[in-house]
Image: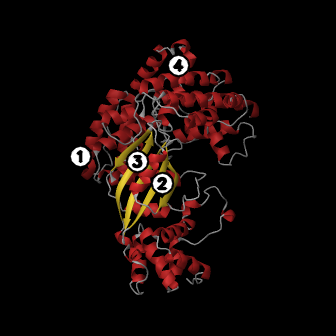
């Protein structure tokens, strides 16, 4: 492959950055350069002709290797470290640098010795987000500090980040001076924990569309990822509060027994509170006892009108109900009155527009998502939504023919099927099976136990390698139960009372992480269709009688709605 020489103005920028005694000038320049060729920056919904192919990181490196000058040597010295997640590329650059004269200041020639030494978390009692602050030593007595803001309202992703050429002690002192208020919480983090916080937030942001961009983000992403990779492994990231169904039921009863909830205690308000608690526990920071103005804005301007399909008269009660619940929740959790007043003011501010939105035509559910992505041009087609939902029902049961023939006969209490399971994994599968059975007997019923056994049998026979790896049997069992429940409308808010939640499973098995994380691996191993966030196992064999009956009713309702057009 032939490569064009690097542009002269690039050399000028390199020399300017290198002449600056501050290492961050050059590091930031190379980080920005790598961001430009990062495929994560491409629009996944753009047509091929709208996204001309640019150079890859490997091709960019090859261009620098083809032009042996002091400037490209400088670039390669930084790229070798910032791109050290690719062992092959790293080794290739190192081989090339070994043939060139060493160039640059001490901090550059010893860039591989860079190390982080302290991490701090700056949080707020309402939980909208956290600043993860990491102090870093470079050779030659230089220091830089990374500041990564992890936003919980948008899904635990990086909303902004930047790097400054100052010691972490100075940055923390500046923040403490600027944010001198009792609602800010400071906590020293282990470097291992800081790594998980940052890497998980970057990963979520990388799959979020449209991507979040600021003056410094994602331009500094390669630099921050490089530092994060050098931190110790084995830490824990953000741990949202875990609320199981029993705790939420008790919280609901306490609210409606309080002075704020007592006047609102009726079936509609209890049902509507269930939706508010769904948002409060499964979205954003995950704590239904703490509400900020930002959460109120998202709830009223997006989540409730889009997510909850109900008459406007029913949804109209939400501002009054939320105001009462915020007063109760903040009192119970000890939130200062000033913060409560700010949240109540946000409710008053957004309520009028919310009342207009819920009375206006608008896409909801999957339609709203497609509309937000700019793919909603077909919403004017008659019955498009019914057709899309029927397709989803068909996927759950394995096709249109299976959907037509679906019945609601309860699953039998059947023994575990050991056929096709290799002997070397059988002992571990047996351990997982015992844990799965116990959990289903405690939290669910015989039908779910049969579903879970079938799921486990398919995974063990189709992808036995997952049981050959060193991993905990309790997390595997939790994942199997979660898959069985998720496929049958559990682990989420469905029509009717909330039953099994992910928190119930994690609490039963006494594990820290969500079962969905391990479930993703097991779904792939079992060759199941669908995704972990929308489990569709593709056969009625994995559906309880109750779930199949729900699908049958919904199938018939949708077809009846479409009848005039057939």
Q: CA distance from mark 2 to mark 4?
A: 37 Å
Which residue in the structure is indicated by mark 1?
Answer: 427
Nearest-to-viewer mark from 4 and 1: 4
Q: Which circle marks residue 121 in the picture?
A: 3
Residue at horizontal 46%, vertical 42%?
180
Label 3 vs 1, first from the N-terminus: 3
The residue carrying mark 2 is 202
Characterize the local packing of mark 1: few (<14), some (14-19) or many (20 or more) Cα atoms within 10 angstroms. Answer: few
Residue 311: x percent and y percent?
66, 24
Question: Going 38% across and 37% down the picture, which residue do you hit?
Answer: 481
In the image, taking residue 563 as reference, residue 11 lies left or right, namely left
Please, what secondary structure does the residue beneath circle 3 have? strand
Residue found farthest to the front: 177
For marks 4 and 1, give the CA distance. Answer: 47 Å
Give me the residue at 67% from left, 44% from top: 371
Q: Residues within 10 Å of mark 3 (few under 14, many from 20)?
A: many
Q: Nearer the viewer, mark 2 or mark 4?
A: 2
Q: Please say if 422 is above or below 505.
A: below
Q: Earlier in the sequence, mark 4 or mark 1?
A: 4
Is residue 492 among what the camera can see?
A: no
Q: Nearer the viewer, residue 65 or 549?
A: 65
How many angstroms separate mark 2 from mark 1 (CA)?
38 Å
Where residue 19 sits: x, y (%)? Answer: 50, 77
* Quadrant of the drawing holding the C terminus: top right
Q: Secondary structure at mark 2?
A: helix
Residue 270: give its label.
4
Q: Which of labels 4 and 3 is toward the front?
A: 3
Q: Given this view, does label 3 or label 2 mark the residue nearer the observer?
A: 3
């Amino acid at each position: 492959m032939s490569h064009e020489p690097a542009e002269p103005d690039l050399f000028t920028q390199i020399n300017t950055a290198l002449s600056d005694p501050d290492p961050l000038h050059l590091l930031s320049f190379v980080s920005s350069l790598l961001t430009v060729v990062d495929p994560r920056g491409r629009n996944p919904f753009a047509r091929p002709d709208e996204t001309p192919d640019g150079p890859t990181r490997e091709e960019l490196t090859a261009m620098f290797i083809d032009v042996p000058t002091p400037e490209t040597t400088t670039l390669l010295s930084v790229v070798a470290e910032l791109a050290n997640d690719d062992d092959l590329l790293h080794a290739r650059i190192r081989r090339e640098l070994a043939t060139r004269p060493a160039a640059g200041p001490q901090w550059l020639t010893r860039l591989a010795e860079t190390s982080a030494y302290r991490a701090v978390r700056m949080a707020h009692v309402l939980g909208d987000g956290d600043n993860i602050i990491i102090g870093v030593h470079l050779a030659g007595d230089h220091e830089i500090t990374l500041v990564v803001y992890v936003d919980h309202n948008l899904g635990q992703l990086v909303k902004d980040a930047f790097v400054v050429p100052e010691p972490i002690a100075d940055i923390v002192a500046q923040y403490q001076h600027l944010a001198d208020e009792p609602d800010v919480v400071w906590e020293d983090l282990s470097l291992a924990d800081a790594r998980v916080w940052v890497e998980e937030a970057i990963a979520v942001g990388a799959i979020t569309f449209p991507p979040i961009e600021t003056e410094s983000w994602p331009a500094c992403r390669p630099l921050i990822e490089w530092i994060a990779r050098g931190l110790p492994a084995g830490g824990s990231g953000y741990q949202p509060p875990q609320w199981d169904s029993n705790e939420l039921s008790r919280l609901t009863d306490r609210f409606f027994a309080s002075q704020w909830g007592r006047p609102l205690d009726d079936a509609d308000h209890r049902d509507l509170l269930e939706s508010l608690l769904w948002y409060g526990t499964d979205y954003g920071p995950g704590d239904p006892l703490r509400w900020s103005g930002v959460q109120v804005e998202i709830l009223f301007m997006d989540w409730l009108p889009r997510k909850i399909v109900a008459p406007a008269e029913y949804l109209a009660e939400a501002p009054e109900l939320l105001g009462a619940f915020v007063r109760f929740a903040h009192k119970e959790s000890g939130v200062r009155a000033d913060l409560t007043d700010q949240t109540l003011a946000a409710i008053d501010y957004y309520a009028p527009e919310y009342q207009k939105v819920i009375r206006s035509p608008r896409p909801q559910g999957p339609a709203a998502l497609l509309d937000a992505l700019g793919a909603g041009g077909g919403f004017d087609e008659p019955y498009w939504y019914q057709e899309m939902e029927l397709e989803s029902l068909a996927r759950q049961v394995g096709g249109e023919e299976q959907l037509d023939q679906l019945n609601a006969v309860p699953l039998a209490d059947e023994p575990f099927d050991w056929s096709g399971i290799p002997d070397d994994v059988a002992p571990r599968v047996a351990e997982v099976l015992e844990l799965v059975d116990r959990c289903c007997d405690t939290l669910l019923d015989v039908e779910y136990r049969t579903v879970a056994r079938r799921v486990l049998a398919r995974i063990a026979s189709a992808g036995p390698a997952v049981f050959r790896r060193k991993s905990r049997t309790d997390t595997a069992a939790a994942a199997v139960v979660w898959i069985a429940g998720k496929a049958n409308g559990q682990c989420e808010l469905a029509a009717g009372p909330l039953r099994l939640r992910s928190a119930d499973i994690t609490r039963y098995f006494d594990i820290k992480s969500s079962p969905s994380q391990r479930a993703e691996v097991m779904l792939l191993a079992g060759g199941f269709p669908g995704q972990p966030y929308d489990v569709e196992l593709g056969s009625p064999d994995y559906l309880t009688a109750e779930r199949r009956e729900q699908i049958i009713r919904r199938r018939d309702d949708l077809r009846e709605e479409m009848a005039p057009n057939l």
